[in-house]
Amino acid sequence: MAGKDLKSIVDKIIDLPTLPQVVTTIINLIDDPDSSAKDINDVMGQDPALVAKILKIVNSAFYGLPNRVSSISQAIVILGFNTVKSLALSASVLDMFGAGDDHFSYEEFWKHSVGCATICQTIAKNQHGVEADTAFVLGLMHDMGKLVLDQYAPVEFQAIIKIASEKEVAFEVAEKEVLETSYADIGYWLSQKWQLADDLAMAIHNQNRPNECSTEEAKKLAAVCSFSEYVCKLKHYGSNGSFGKPELPAESWTILDVDKSQLSELIETINDDMHKADEFLSMVNS
């Protein structure tokens, strides 16, 4: 694609979607060590629909808590600030985009993304220095650049999907025939606009090449993401516009250093994650 055409696309997506003000405030408050559960609860009270959705998820089988949680303050005490932040961000992101079209199913896209998110969370719990809630958000958001392309450059996006489908290749392979940028670049711009953590943004940017991350946490996050993507593709859990054979970058396996003696147990846990992902989607969409 010629430079002029590329510029016209970039101009279209320069006004990237913004997070609801309530969610932006929550992220800033939780990142502030002087904030309290009451501060978060007061801000969330401005968006009753978001509160209701978060409490639905918290009280679902996704978390399996023994007692019902009736307030955000209680959820923070039981699950922690970061979990509540990731839930607020996740619920908002899932609400932000339309239903897709005949060329691309958003239902299948979100199924794939939530599947990746739950697997990311599980893998992260076994990785030193990786925050499980951050890994969940990464799994949910790693393909967001594709939705931005669909919304702001639909002709180019549909061309990519057509090439990927006909040639049976990965989305990132097909997009090189159409664009001079990538969905990972766009996801990185979006995460920066939303003022998400630097390591999270870097992992989104380098999700297909973890070794290019400049920090160890981002490198592990990116490896967790590519591993989760690989598993979801193997299990045909949802669809994200990629039609190539599932491939796990060798560097991801090396970075994660998974104990092979624990692999069968990990796979069993991942199988349970698929059911948890269904539950999460059900609660968010209800």
Image: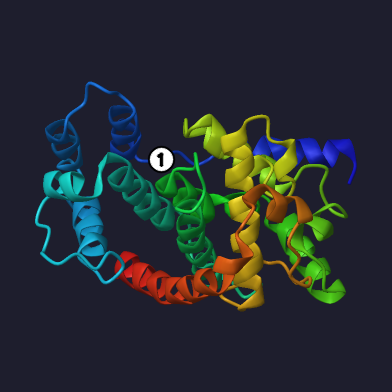
Left or right of 148 in this view: 33:
left
> To which residue does mark 1 refer?
19
Residue 136 percent across, percent down from the top left? 45, 53
Can you name the residue that lies furthest to the top here?
A: 34
Q: What residue sits 71% from the left and 37% below the top?
A: 10
Q: Nearer the viewer, residue 243 or 130?
A: 130
Q: Mark 1 belongs to which amino acid?
A: Leu
In the image shown, does 267 or 121 lie closer to the viewer? 267
Query: Exactly how many numbered labels are in the figure?
Result: 1
Is the residue 207 above or below the residue 277 in the image? above
The residue sitting at 37% across, 50% down in the picture is 92
Question: Which color scheme is applied?
Answer: rainbow
- Looking at the image, which residue is at 69% across and 42% down? 206
**Residue 167 in which image quadrant:** bottom right
Q: Position of residue 148 (x, y in %)?
A: 60, 50
Write the residue at 54% across / 39% down: 200
Can you give x and y, in whole percent of width and height, for residue 116 in the image?
Answer: 53, 62
Label 1 residue SS: loop
Image quadrant where residue 31 sits: top left
Compared with 83, 243 (above or below) is below
Q: Quadrant of the C terminus?
A: bottom left
Relative to 60, say whether 10 is above or below. Answer: above
Mark 1 Cα shell of 10 Å, populated few (<14), some (14-19), many (≥20): some
For residue 104, say whether it is visible.
no
Left or right relative to 149: residue 43: left
Decide which of 172, 267 is in the foreground and name it: 267
Q: Is residue 58 visible?
A: yes
Describe residue 122's horizontal placement relative to residue 157 as left or right.
left
Q: Residue furthest front?
A: 261
